Amino acid sequence: MTHATSRTRLRRTALVAGAFLALATATATGTAQAAASAAASTSAAARPASGPRIAAAPSSCPKYYFCGYKNANYSNLSFKFRDCYLQAIPTDLISGGSWYNNQSNGTKAKMYDYYKNLIYTTPGAPYGDAHGDWSKVWYVDAC
Protein backbone atom coordinates (compact mmCIF):
# COMPACT_ATOMS: atom_id res chain seq x y z
CA MET A 1 0.00 0.00 0.00
CA THR A 2 1.38 3.40 -0.94
CA HIS A 3 1.70 6.35 1.38
CA ALA A 4 -1.01 8.24 -0.59
CA THR A 5 -3.47 5.33 -0.31
CA SER A 6 -2.82 5.03 3.41
CA ARG A 7 -3.39 8.77 3.86
CA THR A 8 -6.67 8.60 1.88
CA ARG A 9 -7.96 5.75 4.05
CA LEU A 10 -6.97 7.63 7.19
CA ARG A 11 -8.88 10.72 5.99
CA ARG A 12 -11.98 8.64 5.23
CA THR A 13 -11.82 7.01 8.66
CA ALA A 14 -11.46 10.43 10.30
CA LEU A 15 -14.41 11.80 8.31
CA VAL A 16 -16.63 8.87 9.26
CA ALA A 17 -15.61 9.12 12.92
CA GLY A 18 -16.28 12.87 12.85
CA ALA A 19 -19.72 12.31 11.32
CA PHE A 20 -20.65 9.79 14.01
CA LEU A 21 -19.39 12.15 16.71
CA ALA A 22 -21.42 15.04 15.26
CA LEU A 23 -24.54 12.85 15.06
CA ALA A 24 -24.12 11.66 18.64
CA THR A 25 -23.55 15.22 19.86
CA ALA A 26 -26.58 16.57 17.97
CA THR A 27 -28.78 13.78 19.32
CA ALA A 28 -27.54 14.27 22.87
CA THR A 29 -28.15 18.00 22.79
CA GLY A 30 -31.62 17.68 21.33
CA THR A 31 -30.69 18.88 17.85
CA ALA A 32 -29.58 22.27 19.08
CA GLN A 33 -28.55 23.31 15.57
CA ALA A 34 -32.11 22.96 14.27
CA ALA A 35 -33.45 25.06 17.12
CA ALA A 36 -30.72 27.68 16.65
CA SER A 37 -31.40 27.83 12.92
CA ALA A 38 -35.12 28.25 13.49
CA ALA A 39 -34.56 30.98 16.07
CA ALA A 40 -32.22 32.80 13.71
CA SER A 41 -34.62 32.64 10.79
CA THR A 42 -37.60 33.95 12.71
CA SER A 43 -38.80 34.76 16.15
CA ALA A 44 -42.18 33.73 14.87
CA ALA A 45 -44.49 31.08 16.09
CA ALA A 46 -44.66 27.40 15.40
CA ARG A 47 -40.96 26.72 15.16
CA PRO A 48 -39.81 23.18 15.92
CA ALA A 49 -39.23 21.97 19.45
CA SER A 50 -35.65 21.39 20.45
CA GLY A 51 -36.42 17.73 21.08
CA PRO A 52 -36.11 14.83 18.68
CA ARG A 53 -38.69 13.88 16.08
CA ILE A 54 -41.58 11.92 17.50
CA ALA A 55 -41.76 8.31 16.40
CA ALA A 56 -45.32 8.21 15.11
CA ALA A 57 -47.84 10.72 13.86
CA PRO A 58 -50.80 11.56 16.08
CA SER A 59 -53.73 9.31 15.18
CA SER A 60 -55.77 12.39 14.25
CA CYS A 61 -53.31 13.40 11.51
CA PRO A 62 -53.60 11.13 8.45
CA LYS A 63 -50.70 10.42 6.12
CA TYR A 64 -50.12 13.17 3.49
CA TYR A 65 -51.59 15.93 5.70
CA PHE A 66 -50.27 18.90 7.64
CA CYS A 67 -52.29 19.13 10.86
CA GLY A 68 -52.75 22.05 13.24
CA TYR A 69 -53.93 21.66 16.83
CA LYS A 70 -55.42 24.23 19.17
CA ASN A 71 -53.65 22.76 22.21
CA ALA A 72 -50.16 21.47 22.96
CA ASN A 73 -49.27 17.81 22.54
CA TYR A 74 -51.38 17.36 19.43
CA SER A 75 -54.76 17.72 21.10
CA ASN A 76 -57.90 19.39 19.78
CA LEU A 77 -57.36 19.12 16.01
CA SER A 78 -58.22 22.43 14.38
CA PHE A 79 -57.33 21.81 10.72
CA LYS A 80 -55.69 19.39 8.33
CA PHE A 81 -54.38 20.60 4.98
CA ARG A 82 -52.96 18.55 2.15
CA ASP A 83 -53.28 20.83 -0.87
CA CYS A 84 -50.34 22.87 -2.12
CA TYR A 85 -51.58 26.45 -1.93
CA LEU A 86 -51.84 29.21 0.67
CA GLN A 87 -54.72 28.45 3.05
CA ALA A 88 -55.97 30.52 5.98
CA ILE A 89 -55.83 28.79 9.33
CA PRO A 90 -58.88 28.91 11.64
CA THR A 91 -59.27 32.16 13.54
CA ASP A 92 -59.42 30.41 16.92
CA LEU A 93 -55.69 29.60 16.72
CA ILE A 94 -54.37 32.68 18.47
CA SER A 95 -51.56 31.31 20.65
CA GLY A 96 -50.02 28.08 21.88
CA GLY A 97 -50.98 24.87 20.14
CA SER A 98 -49.02 22.33 18.15
CA TRP A 99 -48.60 21.02 14.61
CA TYR A 100 -47.57 17.85 12.84
CA ASN A 101 -46.30 17.55 9.27
CA ASN A 102 -47.31 14.03 8.17
CA GLN A 103 -46.89 14.53 4.42
CA SER A 104 -44.69 12.37 2.23
CA ASN A 105 -41.12 12.05 3.46
CA GLY A 106 -39.11 15.24 3.16
CA THR A 107 -42.04 17.52 2.25
CA LYS A 108 -41.81 20.92 3.94
CA ALA A 109 -44.79 23.08 4.87
CA LYS A 110 -44.57 26.88 4.96
CA MET A 111 -46.17 29.29 7.42
CA TYR A 112 -47.05 32.90 6.64
CA ASP A 113 -47.99 35.99 8.62
CA TYR A 114 -51.00 38.30 8.20
CA TYR A 115 -49.34 40.04 5.22
CA LYS A 116 -48.57 36.69 3.57
CA ASN A 117 -44.85 36.98 4.26
CA LEU A 118 -43.08 33.67 4.76
CA ILE A 119 -42.11 33.37 8.42
CA TYR A 120 -41.23 29.70 8.79
CA THR A 121 -40.53 26.55 6.78
CA THR A 122 -40.89 23.26 8.63
CA PRO A 123 -38.27 20.55 8.58
CA GLY A 124 -39.05 17.77 6.14
CA ALA A 125 -41.87 15.38 7.01
CA PRO A 126 -42.47 13.54 9.18
CA TYR A 127 -41.94 16.17 11.88
CA GLY A 128 -43.97 17.87 14.56
CA ASP A 129 -43.89 20.51 17.25
CA ALA A 130 -45.83 19.52 20.36
CA HIS A 131 -45.50 23.05 21.79
CA GLY A 132 -45.94 25.51 18.94
CA ASP A 133 -47.32 29.03 18.89
CA TRP A 134 -49.84 30.18 16.32
CA SER A 135 -49.79 33.85 17.38
CA LYS A 136 -47.94 35.08 14.25
CA VAL A 137 -49.24 32.48 11.78
CA TRP A 138 -52.24 33.30 9.55
CA TYR A 139 -51.70 31.04 6.53
CA VAL A 140 -50.15 27.66 5.77
CA ASP A 141 -49.03 26.17 2.46
CA ALA A 142 -48.90 22.44 3.13
CA CYS A 143 -46.22 21.72 0.54
Image (cartoon, rainbow, N blue to C red):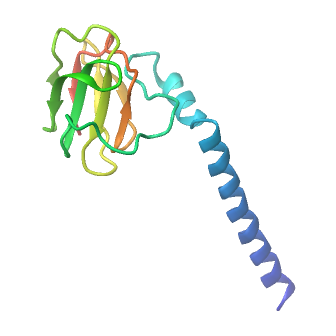
Q: Tell me which residue sits at (66%, 57%) in the image.
A: 20
Q: Name the quadrant of the C terminus.
A: top left
Picture coordinates of residue 69, whole percent (x, y): 25, 22
Q: Tell me which residue sits at (78%, 84%) in the image.
A: 5
Picture coordinates of residue 123, whole percent (x, y): 40, 39
Q: Is residue 48 left or right of residue 29?
A: left
Picture coordinates of residue 23, whole percent (x, y): 62, 50
Q: Tell me which residue sits at (27%, 36%) in the image.
A: 58
Most foreground residue, 87 or 127: 127
Place residue 26 in its image quadrant: top right
55 up-or-down from 136: above or below: below
Place residue 129 in its image quadrant: top left
Q: Tell me which residue sits at (30%, 26%) in the image.
A: 74
Picture coordinates of residue 90, whole percent (x, y): 15, 15
Q: Is residue 115 left or right of residue 28?
A: left
Q: Name the quadrant of the N terminus.
A: bottom right
74 up-or-down from 97: above or below: below
| Residue 86 visible | no
> In this view, which residue lies farthest toward the right?
3
> In this view, which residue lies farthest toward the bottom?
1
105 up-or-down from 37: above or below: below
Q: Is residue 122 left or right of residue 61?
A: right
